[in-house]
Image: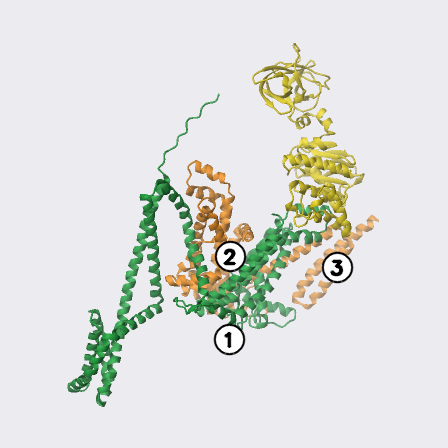
Chain colours: A yellow, B orange, C green
Amino acid sequence: MRVEMKNLSKHFGRVKAVNDFSVILNDGELVCLLGPSGCGKSTVLNMLSGILPVTGGKIYFDDEDVTDLPPEQRGIGLVFQNYALYPHMTVLGNICFPLEIQGLPKAERIQRATEMAELVHMEGMLHRKPKELSGGQQQRVAIARALVKRPNLLLLDEPLSNLDARLRLEMREEIRRIQLQTKVTTIFVTHDQEEAMSISDHIVLMKDGFLQQHDDPQALYNEPANQFVADFLGNPPINNIKGAIHSGFFVAQNGDKVRLPETDGAPEGVKVHLAIRAESFMMADEGDESCLHCTVENVYQLGKEEMALLNFGDTQVRAYLSFDYGLKAGDEVTLQVRDRGVFLFDLETGRRYA
Amino acid sequence: MKKQNRTRSLLGTVTYVAGIVLALVGSLTWLFKETGSLPFAVGLVAVAIGLFLNHSYKTKVLSLRGIRYFFLSVGALIMVFPFYWMLVSAFKTSAEMNLFPPSMLPKNWRNFNNFVVAFQTAPFARYFLNSVATCLSSVGITTFTTVLAAFAFSRLKFPGRDVLFSLLLSMMMVPFEMLVITNYTTIVKVGLNDTIWALILPFTSSIFYTYILRNFFVSIPEGLYWSARVDGCTNWRYLWKIMVPIARPSLVTIVLLNAMASWNSFMWPLLVIKKDINRTLPFGLYTFTTEVGANNELLMAASLVVVMPMIILFLFARKQIVSGVSRGGIKG
Amino acid sequence: MKQKLPAPTFRKRPQRGLRRLAVHVVALFLLGGLILYLGLSGREMLINHMDVAKANVSIDILHTKALADIKPILQEYANDSVNSILDQAISSKKRGLKTVVGDMFASGSTTEEIYLAVEQAVFEGIASRTDQASADGLQAVAREDLDKFMAQLVQEETEALDNLCLAKVRKSLKVTEKGYAQMYYHIALIAIGGVLLGFATFLFGIWLFAPHKTKIKTAELLEPIDYLLPFFVGVFIFTLYPIVRVVIMSFQERYRLDGSFQGWGLGNYQYVIHGIPGTSNYFTQGLRNTFLYVIMTVPITTVLAVIIAYLLNQKLRFSALFQTTYFLPMVTSVTAVGLVWRWIFNGNFGILNAVLQLFGTTPIDWLRDTNYSMTVLVVFGIWNSLPFTIILLLSGLQNIDESYYTVAKVDGAKAMRIFRRITVPLLAPTIGLVLTINSISAFKVFTDVTVLFNGSPGPAFNMYTVVYYIYEMMRNRLELGRAAAAAIILFVFIFIFTMLQRYIQRKWNYTT
């Protein structure tokens, strides 16, 4: 089912939680609403489900205006952060309950519920009560219960926040698998960028109630729309070096220069951040005027690679470097930047120049 | 099509509201006159018609809410009525009390005569004093022993601590009615029969309150204790300067509940107190009934005096009392 | 630049443990000594008191008995004329004799000497009424028997006399409760003083002779003891000891206030359960009434409270006002409110009858008509237990997570279904709790009955309850053993209920 949100806004008194939010989500996609706490992503989800009334704007499910419809008439399935499994019913009872409300006969209810349980790999636990299940198992049941009535839209509110790190990995793959198998349009809310990046078809990144960028994960990573997007995605976070633009060069505070590609309307002398991904550094060739002089503060072994923490002027920079250089603390190095993974943002507005 | 709907819904709302008004008026008149039944019935019918004409979401919600308020209000009236009746009767004269059907309001709100006579007939001031003295002493001592014991059971380590505590818990189940027999003989044997000590001494410790307070103390993180110890803080100081202030809400609740129970206790004073001047308020009130015979207005005046302190306390500390009762009830 | 932190300094304090030990030793010695002294001096006073009492009784007995013993001997030998004046003579001398006997007793004369003096006084009395010669003559002829009697007196009667004295003393001391009580008061003080002193000596011994480690260990143990002592003194005397005592008492047949009992056995239980054959058994009647009361009050209260709690849980305006009105009866004394209800139920002037009259029914004499006694009690009971029940249920309702309702609503469930399938099951443990607590309280109903029916359990004793039985056994009939047995039976019922509740709560508790 195609979901379209047009100029959606939500005000709580004077607080504007969501502003002029317009996004189109395609049928069968797994979309992630991503952003820091308080960015409005849960608010958007609650408006989509109908729990929160909308202050302004419209919501369309497959071209039907559902903005004023109560939740039970929107055909959605909902999974809360705490799963909200009825503690006094068995797993089977929990999954059957939505069908019971719809008035399906008992045999059919049990059959459909069992199918759903098989989908989420919980068919052996149908007679257990929620308190006997682990966190991951409870979540599977919650998803099964949301899907059993064959909704057009599945909404998940921070589904993985209550799980430990290893389980999170396993469960996010499970969610992806289930979604691919059922082909249900799925929207889930999270603040964990790695989660979003790994399983979504598209990511909707929000900040302070505003849409920042809506794209597939690679695009957000490789072509961030602004400073915030670049800062938010990527581990370790992107390195920002302050400086200014002078005649086609980025000039840092200590005088180091970096040659720039095409800049998009960057006026001369404007203060900028040179944003460099950790994997976009390389050792400079001899005599290259476009380089950065740094001293090594520390080198960290990360198993599969080495990360160097370098002092550049009064900032610190993290760079992935290969083993061969044998760097140690106190060494002076000269670095160059690659073409990919390097961006130029306005220092004040965050607007992207390159 | 739309216009028809609008008039229909408007008509429905009007009928609905008119129906409610009629029904209310009718029911009130019906209380006093037979003729009230007709408008009442008509009102109900009008409400039904109104709902039928306009069964939008809003009217349904309104009517549901209306029913809720109605039911709750009726219930609230029934709960409060005895107090109202007590208040009203306390100011009536003897003649007014003998009216049948009784009047809803006293003729003269300034008629303090009943209070005066009641206080003259029985030493209510003395009863009041006795109750206050018992309450303060008993609650004071109990709070002291409870705080100390709860501290010992939560922070101090000694062999057999947990076993002892579970033993205490099992004793909590024993009803006072069973202990009363021996406590009575103990008091008599020691010769404290008919004194104020008989009212205070058996109630200087409470397993129930200790249990509640100890659970609360346990929930205070142990890190606080050890960092204070490392700074050289003694147990006594830690207890009174840190734990007790943190546990203040729980303590306040315990004190309130204890005070209420002590003030309202009846069976125990009934047993141990013989002389009139040693009686506590509820007991004194009860014996007052035999002295006063059929002069119920005096009784009502006296009862009013007895319940007033508790009502005032309740009005001020309602939230505390309610939360304390629910917490204590669930634990017990 | 990292600077080295200055070396830590600790104030050297004297070993706290040792000091505590010493303080305890001194304090305990002082306190124990003081209490012991109080007890002993009181005991001395008491012994004096007893001696005086014994003396008075002895004097009394002696002089009356002497007269009573001598009279028949004289009567045998006296001729008619002397016989007629014998009584006069005795009665005239009686009062004066008492002082004489008292003086002789105080100065330590033997019983025989006292008897001789009494004898002499009687003869004087006869002489003053006839003539010396007759008196002397009587004395002469009765001399042999009198001597025989005196000899007998020296042997047997002295002892019997002593026992008689003692029995009378004890009886007289028991009659005065104060004196009787004081015996235990001082014994208690002496015991406590002794224990404290013993404990002080024990600690002193440790302080003098024990190795350092033991000293510290003891000192550490002292601290929890200090904290727990005030609490445990009360618990021990008024909770633990009574529990044990009542159990024992229930097996002591015909246990009385002075401690005497007939023997060990199940007699008390038999009396309680079977009653006196031929008469109606109060206890089973009380049990029946109590059961009826419980069955009628508790379910109605629970249902009403669930509805009201559910309504109060919705977001309504005036919730503070509603809460105040619904919870008010909980804080007020049952006695005071009972009086109002008594007035409301009044057969002649009560407002309830007035309301009934409006609806056309005849007024009912609620408080005197036995058919309606239970109704009155039940209505009052419901009104009293509603606030507490509502509070508990409201708390239970509020503990149900909002998200359960939201998910169900999103799935399209209507209010009725939500209530039936989600609210009630999740509220079940609280309902169970409420049922149990209320049942236990209802079982112990006593004050309600006393107040509503002005002391008597119902207009025709028809509202007799279990606790009333205990109270009556204890206060009016002073049959403590039977009261104890009844109390134990009551406890058994309550225990069963509580265990049931624990079991149900565990079964219905889905969240842990």
Q: Report the residue marked by disc 3.
A: B46
Label 2 crowd bin: few (<14), some (14–19), many (20+), radius 10 Å: some
* Circle on res. B173: 2
The amino acid sitting under disc 1 is Pro
Q: Is residue C9 left or right of residue A204?
A: left
Tell me the SS state at disc 1.
Answer: loop
The amino acid sitting under disc 2 is Met
Pinpoint residue C435: horizontal percent, then vertical percent. 59, 58
Residue extending farthest left: C133
Q: Mark 2 — on which chain does it sit?
A: B
Tell me the SS state at disc 3.
Answer: helix
Judge whether residue C389 can be spotted in this image: no
Rounded to the nearest angstrom, the CA distance separating label 3 from label 2 is 57 Å
Rounded to the nearest angstrom, the CA distance separating label 3 from label 1 is 67 Å
Label 3 crowd bin: few (<14), some (14–19), many (20+), radius 10 Å: many
Tell me the SS state at disc 2.
Answer: loop
Q: Is residue C492 left or right of residue C158?
A: right
- Residue C254 falls in image quadrant: bottom left
Tell me the mark number nearer the camera, choosing from 3 and 2. Answer: 2
Rounded to the nearest angstrom, the CA distance separating label 1 from label 2 is 34 Å
